Amino acid sequence: MSTYWNDKNSPMNPISAPDFIPMEQMRELQLYRLQGVVKHCYDNVELFRTRLDEKGLKPEDIKVLDDIAKLPFSVKTDLRNHYPYGLFASSLKDIVRLHASSGTTGKPIVVGYTDEDMKVWTNVMVRSLAACGVSSEDIVQNAYGYGLFTGGLGVHCGAEALGATVIPISGGNTSKQIMLLKDFCSTVITVTPSYFLHVIEVASEMGISIKDLPLRVGIFGAEPWTFEMRERIEKEAGIKAYDIYGLSEIIGPGVGVECSAQNGLHIFEDHFYPEIIDPDTGEVLPDGSEGELVLTTLTKQAIPMIRYRTRDITTIMTEKCDCGRTIRRIKKISTRSDDMLIIRGVNVFPSQIEAALLAVEGTLPHYMIYLTTEHDMDAVEVKVEINSAQFGDTVSAIEKLKAAITNSIKSIVGVSVKVTLVEPKTIERSQGKAKRVIDQRNK
Ligand code: DLL
């Protein structure tokens, strides 16, 4: 595997060099690596070899990058069905790390890393942090969960390799998070956006405003969050809030990240080749169209993934980025195709409800969507917190706020919902990925 990116003699910044290489050079590198990974899978993963044989394809048939469209997709159930090690392309003696993602049902999916894979992961995490303006001068409070979840250790390795000071606090223990933010003078926090909202809230109860602390950057991911949520976080904490994307099946955090332009996430496409497909037909869509993100790992050894269907819905952006990076960007991911709720026949994404309610002044970014069946019809209740001062308002002021939220949801989402305003801290807080929907409809 090429290691030009960590070559100390490179005339470019060795860390971020691949982010800026000319597109033609990138495509050449991607083809070379794609041919390599297809052969690696064919030789070492039975499921992949069978699928290729069924199509009458051989690794040598990949002659140009567009030939990728001939290859079969892989999906999460492939990992589940071959639990735990069935899709590994390296022998276990070469695996130095395992992670697992729990998912909602059944057995977890297990992913492994060789020593080289760890180098790639560290490299993309270093580049991610650098893109968010983090340097060796920073103190990074890493509040992603440590353990089988990839968030904690993935960020940890990158931040350490960058030379930053890492505080491996993991998720939870909110008052301690705040104590360390203050006493250790953390300048960067890495955490899920929903948990950070809780940190801001508890800090304020302790009489501390995050704005007055040295914290200047937050790197948020592992769950969808809207532009409206970013606005609230940046305003309330006085920081720059960047979006980081990734998934265990591909590597963990560090598949893509925002840069100073905060307009789309750059994909580290020298390692992860992105395509957008129509989720219904599987057809590849041109850049600029919205669809399901499909990723191929170009350099992973232990558990390479060919055309992995992420279920995340986005668009590959076509315009050049102001930051000068040439690697392509995807739009912020606000939905997964399997997150979509069909409410009385209307397709609704929870992120649309979030955007609609945060558009109304006076709401807090804590909400829950409840779905039930009433008289054979779908019924929706959105519980949202409002601040205590507003609870003291007159009945008519509260009714006015409720009507404003109901109308905002109706106009953005297109369905009528029952809005219930609740006091601060009524809705359960997450310490990792937030749960926003409780669906108790009769199926
Ligand atoms: O969530 C890896 C990660 C850790 C990413 C820390 C960023 C920060 P999984 O647990 O396998 O991995 O979950 C992956 O989470 O397919 C998306 O649906 C969602 N997701 C991750 N990052 C974002 C994001 C980690 N920035 C699944 N925006 C993915 C929206 C995200 N959704």
Image (cartoon, rainbow, N blue to C red):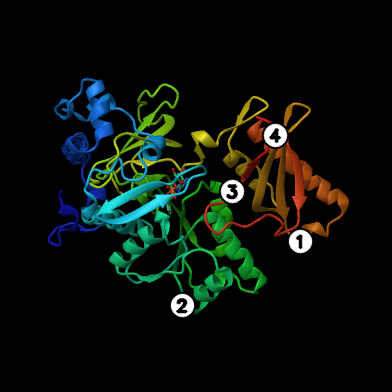
Instruction: Using the image as rendered, state which of residue 386 and residue 434 is in the foreground.
Output: 434
Residue type, label 4 = Lys
Q: At label 1, which amino acid type do we have?
A: Ser
Beta carbon at label 1 within 8 Å of ligand 1: no
Q: Left or right: 42 with respect to 387?
A: left
Does 70 sit above or below residue 298? above
Q: Using the numbered discs, state the Cα–Cα distance from disc 2 to disc 1 in whole angstroms.
A: 31 Å
Residue 194 in the image, given as x and y percentages of width and height: 56, 55
Q: Earlier in the sequence, mark 4 or mark 1?
A: 1
Q: Which mark is residue 388?
A: 1
Q: Mark 4 points at which residue?
A: 410
Callout 2, which amino acid? Answer: Phe
Q: Are marks 4 and 1 in contact (CB under 8 Å)?
A: no
Label at residue 184: 2
Question: Which badge, 4 or 3, comes first in the chain's sequence?
Answer: 4
The residue beneath circle 3 is 435
CA gap, disc 2 and disc 4 = 45 Å
Mark positioned earlier in the residue sequence (2 or 4): 2
